[in-house]
Image (spheres, rainbow, N blue to C red):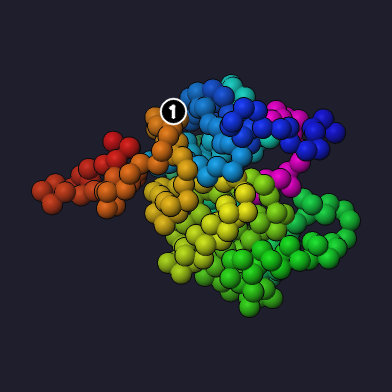
Amino acid sequence: MTEPATSPPMSGTRPEPVISMRSGTATLGARPVLRGVDLTVHRGEVVALLGANGSGKSTAVRSVIGQVPLTGGTVELFGTPLRRFRRWARVGYVPQRTTASGGVPATVHEVVSSGRLSRTRLRPPGKADRAAVDRAIALVGLGDRARDSVDALSGGQHQRVLIARALAAEPELLIMDEPMAGVDLASQEILATTLREQVAAGTTVLLVLHELGPLEPLIDRAVVLRDGCVTHDGPPPEAVGQHALPGHDHVHPHAASEPVRTGLLT
Ligand SMILES: Nc1ncnc2c1ncn2[C@@H]1O[C@H](COP(=O)(O)OP(=O)(O)OP(=O)(O)O)[C@@H](O)[C@H]1O
């Protein structure tokens, strides 16, 4: 193993970076999608990655976990260069909403259990593994649906299953791509509560968001992308009603048809 078993001590007053992307560039097809992105997330931080559609948010987080190779720059996870990083149980990833079953009938319990595989590998699951799976299912409020097929769930419940799958490995770093997109209000509240509990327990979080919304109180720092470049890295934008939130399309009463973008995306 090339990595230390435990994290190195904190240097200075700042906790060590859990994610560190430096000058990241990436191309999809012939299109440059990331154009020199610096993205750092320190231990215990909750960082929101914001930006308009197509600005490169998903590509940035997919580069962080190695799903999209960088054409330039570097990524380190927990201080280890990505190409040498092996301890994936430390990382929970919830992709932009997809189906959890892929056409194969599976129960909530089965899907969430699959999230524990990064810890159990080839050994049979033990008591701690079963407890972690049950805990993750309960956390997202699906304790009474554990034996149901995921096909029978609503979109919001489906998203909760995907989050429980990520939490089953008890990750130190949780990366979620638009967790609130298309999720009903009741599920949004459950997700916000779940996330609050994870953050209180010390989990580091990187969230791709269209707007801060109900997660706003949890966010320590916002990084805004535009056309594959970072245009803001600092305190989350002030919410003045809903109008100052990034991504908000504000249609002025006098405007004919074009929405006027307000906030950091203008
Ligand atoms: N496989 C692909 N091949 C070519 N271009 C792609 C591919 N996937 C994404 N893109 C393009 O790359 C750009 C960045 O996409 P990305 O999904 O990272 O943006 P995003 O900020 O997450 O957007 P959204 O909010 O719509 O999810 C977009 O213009 C998108 O059309």
Task: Work out whether residue 34 can be spotted.
Answer: yes
Q: How many marks?
A: 1
Name the kind of residue labelled 1 in the image.
Cys
Residue at (29% x, 40% y) in the render:
263
| Ligand 1 has an atom within 8 Å of the beta carbon of the residue at disc 1 | no
Q: Where is residue 96 in the image (x, y as percent from the top left)?
A: 53, 50
Q: Is mark 1 on a helix, strand or loop?
A: strand
Q: Is 84 part of what is drawn in magenta?
A: yes
Q: Position of residue 204 (x, y in %)?
A: 60, 45
Determine the residue located farthest toward the left in the rendered image: 254
Residue 20, located in which quarter of the rendered image?
A: top right
**Residue hosting label 1:** 229
Q: Position of residue 42 (x, y in %)?
A: 58, 36
Residue at (35% x, 41% y) in the render:
237
Q: Where is residue 165 in the image (x, y as percent from the top left)?
A: 66, 59
Residue at (40% x, 32% y) in the render:
232
Comparing 262 with 181, the one in front is 262
Comparing 213 with 199, the one in front is 199
Task: Work out whether residue 102 can be spotted.
Answer: no
Image quadrant occupied by the C terminus: top left
Q: What stretch is highlighted in magenta?
A: 79-93
Determine the residue located farthest toward the front in the rendered image: 13
Residue at (68% x, 50% y) in the render:
171
Q: How crowded is mark 1: few (under 14 residues within 10 Å), some or many (20 or more)?
A: some
Determine the residue located farthest toward the right in the rendered image: 123
Left or right position of 53 against 38: left
Q: Is residue 15 above or below residue 159?
A: above
Q: In this view, does 201 lie above or below 50?
A: below
Image quadrant occupied by the N terminus: top right
